Amino acid sequence: MDRMKNSGFYTLKLFVTPEEFDHVLDRFEQKQARFRLSNYERTVHNRTEVYEAYKRYYQYFIKPEKPDYHPSFVYSIALMLDGKMSGFFVRNEGVGFPYLRQWADDELPCILLSFPKGLQIDLKDEKGDYYIYEDIREHQPLTYAFYDEVTRYIKKETKPLRFLSYVIDELQEQKPAVRISKAAMDDLAGSWIFKKYELGWKVK
């Protein structure tokens, strides 16, 4: 038996404005989600605190001059939709890109929303304890349906991120697996990172 079947995560990478992200938070609030920081105390944040944390992360990348703080946005999101606690994870990630024969020192922003594909089931036989992953859709169908609802909404409001960077001596298209909104594209166009690396949009 392949115990690793159904392991891994469903994922979606995105970059949207704080106002657009607030619409996503509204969907989580309707499901009474709890946002916890990934610190030792597992601090719970309310919707306003999560919004402000994302806004600070977002503004780091869209300002005309590079801010003097390091951006971070990391939360676990607990939900109780199938009679048991489950949830999502959201964290900031970087989008690397080439610049003049090497990788740029800075990265474009995105956040990763993830949801586990499997539920760990502990088992035991004559050889001892072991575990397998069973399909999360069978064990937590309501939670999976909510993840599908959220990601379909995000995809409807965004488009694939396509931008141009100087790889050698000419602009070449970059195609990371990230979704971005039109408003976020407009904000990034005037940002310090676009000016520093002479980036451009493939299509706006």
Image (spheres, rainbow, N blue to C red):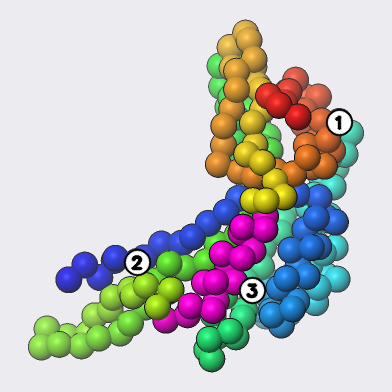
Quick one: quadrant of the N terminus?
bottom left
Q: Nearer the viewer, residue 44 or 138?
A: 138
Location of the C terminus (image quadrant): top right
Decide if residue 201 is in sight here: yes
- Span shown in magenta: 139-154
Distance between mark 1 and mark 3 Cα atoms: 32 Å
Q: Position of residue 193 (x, y in %)?
A: 77, 31
Are discs 3 and 2 less than 8 Å apart at CB?
Answer: no
Identify the disc placed on residue 6: 2
Q: Amino acid at mark 3?
A: Ile
User: Which comes before the other along the chain, label 1 or label 3?
Assistant: 3
Q: Is residue 121 magenta?
A: no
Residue labelled with disc 3: 77
In the rendered image, the vertical position of residue 101 relative to residue 112, given as above or below = above
Whether residue 148 appears in magenta in the rendering, the answer is yes
Q: Residues within 10 Å of mark 2 (few under 14, many from 20)?
A: some
* Residue kind at label 1, given as amino acid type: Gly
